[in-house]
Amino acid sequence: MTKYVIRGGNPLHGEVVISGAKNAAVAIIPAALLVDGVCRIENVPQISDVTLILGILEDLGAQIRTVNRTTLDIDCSNIRKCRASYDMARQIRASYYLVGALLGRFGNAYVPMPGGCDLGARPIDQHEKGFYAMGARVQVINGYIDAKAPAGRLHGAHIYFDVVSVGATMNVMIAAVLADGLTVIENAAKEPHIVDLANFLNSMGADIMGAGTDVIKIRGVPRLCGGTYSIIPDQIEAGTYMAAVAAAGGEVTIQNIIPKHLDCISAKLIEMGVEITEVGDSLTVRRNGPLTKTNVKTLPYPGFPTDMQPQIAAVLCLAQGTSILTEGVWDNRYRFADEFRRMGANIQVDGKIAVIEGVRQLTGAPVSACDLRAGAGMIIAGLAAEGITEIDQIYHIERGYEDIVPKLAGLGADIHVETTSTEEDWHIHAV
C-alpha cells in the first residue's frame, strides 16, 4: 500500500505553479474526437484521469504523440470504432463525454456507464434529455450507454435543463458542434472549464456563443480542423493551495492562475482572516494570525465550488467559533467527516449541513482519502496537525493533482510517499 506521510506543523513559504485544469482537460481531450486533423493541446495536467482518457482514445484508434511534458498532439482522423473500453471508461466520471463526441461525429456511441468518486446519486438524465432532443435514442444496456441517431446525424434543438449540470452542459455542447442547425441550451452551467471547452472547440472551427452565461447557442458546422490550444489553469488546484496556507500558516505566491476564477474562494478566506494580494496572474496568500469562523454554501459557479468543500472544511476545523458548511450540489460529500474526527476535529453532519466547532489543534492520525477532494482535505488537515498523519488510498488524490507531494515539499512541508509491506498493510486494516 502506498500512502502519504505528513509531519505537520510547518508553515508554508515560497512559490507554487498551478497546472492545467483537470475538469477542462478531461472534456477537451474527448472533444478532439470531433476534429479532422491534429490537435495540439498544451498545459495538459499530468494526472491519472488524463492518462485514462488518453488510453481510451488510443484504444479507439487515435494517434497520440507527446511533444513535451505538458503538450500532446492528438489525431483522431482515422478512428472508426464507436465502442469504448469497459475496463478503462468505468474508472472515470468524464468518460461520459465520449458519448457526446462519438454521437456527434458518427451518430452512434457505445460507452460504459461512468465511474469516479462516490458523491451520491449523479444521474445522466439531463445528458439523455439533450441527446433525445437532438434526435438520438439513448438506453442503458449491460452497463453501457447505447446512443444512436437514427438519421445518422444529430440535428439542432432547443434544450432546457431541469437542473444546472456541468456535465450535461459540456456533453450536449460537444454533441451539437457537428449537428445540423442551431442548438440552444438554456439553464446552462457557467463554470470556467465550460468556457474553456467552448474556446477549444471554437479554435478548431466550431460556432459556439454564450459559454459562461446561462444560454449557450451552438450552430453546427460541417467539420472541425486541427489547431493548437492551451488549457486554462486549474481553479481547484489553486484553491487547494490557498486553503493549505490558510490552515498551516505562512506565505505562498500561487502562480499561473486566473484570479477572477478564484474570487469565490478568496472572499471566504479573507472573511476568515487570511490576507490575499493579487498581482497579474498570481496571488500571494498569507496567514499569521488566528482564523475566524464563517459560513460557506457550495453552489454552481460563480458560487463557492463544491470541489473545494472538503478543503475549506479542513480550514474551518481550525477556525475560532462555530461555522456552518452547507453542500448545495451533491448528496454524499461528507464521508470525510469521520476521518477529520480521527484527527480531533469537532464536526457534526446532518444531511447536507455540517456544523464545525473550531479546535485549537488537530493531531496526526492514520486516515483514508475516500475521494479526490476529500483526499486534498486530508492533506490540508495533516499539514496543520501536530504529529504524523498517514493518508492511504492516495490513488484518489492522484486523479486530480499533479506532483502534489513535490510541490508541497517545495513550500517547506514535511511530506513524502511511503510504500508499506503486505504484512504491515494487513496489520493496519486488522487493527
Image: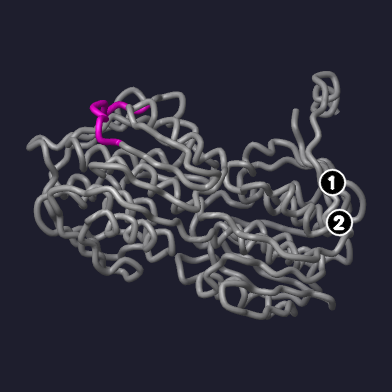
Task: Determine whether the residue tagged by mark 1 lies in a helix, strand or loop.
Answer: strand
Is residue 124 shown above or below 354? Answer: above
Please state the horizontal and vertical placement of residue 339, each as a whole percent of the image.
75, 47
Residue at (21, 64) in percent of width and height: 217
Residue at (20, 61) in percent of width and height: 207
Residue at (56, 38) in percent of width and height: 48
Task: Determine whether the residue tagged by mark 2 lies in a helix, strand or loop.
Answer: loop
Q: Is residue 54 left or right of residue 182?
A: right
Please state the horizontal and vertical placement of residue 410, each as a whole percent of the image.
78, 55
What span is in magenta?
Answer: 76-84
Q: Is residue 49 magenta?
A: no
Q: Is residue 83 magenta?
A: yes
Please state the horizontal and vertical placement of residue 32, each as a whole percent of the image.
32, 44
Q: Quadrant of residue 268?
A: bottom right
Residue at the disc numbered 2: 385
Q: Foreground residue, 367 or 400?
A: 400
Which quadrant of the rendered structure holds the C terminus? top right
The three-letter amino acid code for the residue at tag 1 is Thr
Q: Which mark is residue 389?
A: 1
Q: Foreground residue, 207 or 249?
A: 207
Q: Are marks 2 and 1 in contact (CB under 8 Å)?
A: yes
Is residue 38 shown above or below 161? Answer: above
Q: Quadrant of residue 137?
A: top left
